[in-house]
Image (cartoon, rainbow, N blue to C red):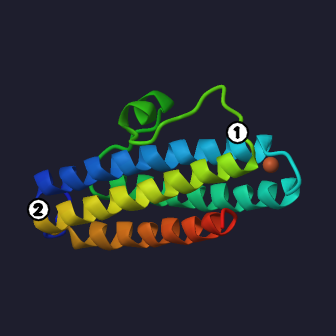
Amino acid sequence: MKTKIGVSNSQLKESADILSVLLADEMVLYIKTRKFHWNVSGQSFMELHKLFQDEYVELEEIIDLVAERINKLGTKTVGTMKEYIELTRLAETPDKYPNQKDLIRELLDNHESIAVFIRKDIEHLNESSKDFGTIDFVTGILEQHESISWVLRRYLN
Ligand SMILES: [Fe+2]
């Protein structure tokens, strides 16, 4: 059945496309955070091991909400690693096992990058479709990335 929520089908498709790219970003960062949870070592091993676990659990919740919202907008949700790698704006770092500071820096950089991407997405949606449901939804996710960034930044001061 068609979605009738006051936003045209082409505009809903635009929102779904924006969310699909965000989903890919969240998925890449989720996998990266798990990798760092598994491989962190050094003096603050257990603290960072647990911190990264909290962060990937939060990302997993975000991923599920983004994926389901794409479906709510009337579009199929992408669900393969191949598609996520094609869609993401983040870079993976295979074969790299940074030291504690560098892996915190990389996670911080990725969370801040997603915050910047979401701001641009919000600006775009506000100028085009005015899909306020999606704008509100991604604004909440933006705030989550800002909070995680704040915590990571504290380790680097
Ligand atoms: Fe674990």
- Of residues 1 and 88, the one drawn nearer to the viewer in this rendering: 88
Identify the residue at horizontal 50%, vertical 51% (top origin): 110
The answer to whether marks 2 and 1 mark residues whose Cβ atoms lie closer than 8 Å is no
Identify the residue at horizontal 58%, vertical 66% (top origin): 148
Mark 2 / mark 1, whichever is N-terminal = 1
Cα separation, mark 2 vs mark 1, equals: 41 Å
- Of residues 98 and 5, the one drawn nearer to the viewer in this rendering: 98
Residue 69 occupies which quadrant of the picture? bottom left
Relative side of 2 to 113, left or right: left
Check the picture and name the quadrant holding the C terminus. bottom right
Residue 128 is labelled as 2
| Residue 84 place in picture, x, y as percent | 44, 36
Relative side of 127 to 55, left or right: left
Asked if residue 143 shows in the view, the reply is yes
- Helix, strand or loop at label 2? It is loop
Local crowd at mark 1 within 10 Å, few (<14), some, or many (≥20)? Answer: some
| Residue 124 place in picture, x, y as percent | 18, 60
Identify the residue at horizontal 66%, vertical 53% (top origin): 104
Question: Furthest residue to the front?
Answer: 157
Asked if residue 1 shows in the view, the reply is no
Residue 56 occupies which quadrant of the picture? bottom right
Q: Is mark 1 within 8 Å of ligand 1?
A: no
| Residue 89 place in picture, x, y as percent | 38, 42
- Residue denoted by label 1: 98
Q: Amino acid at mark 2?
A: Ser
Residue 34 is labelled as none
Q: Amino acid at mark 1?
A: Pro
- Helix, strand or loop at label 1? It is loop
- Of residues 59 and 52, the one drawn nearer to the viewer in this rendering: 52
Local crowd at mark 2 within 10 Å, few (<14), some, or many (≥20)? Answer: few
Disc number lying in front (2 or 1):
1
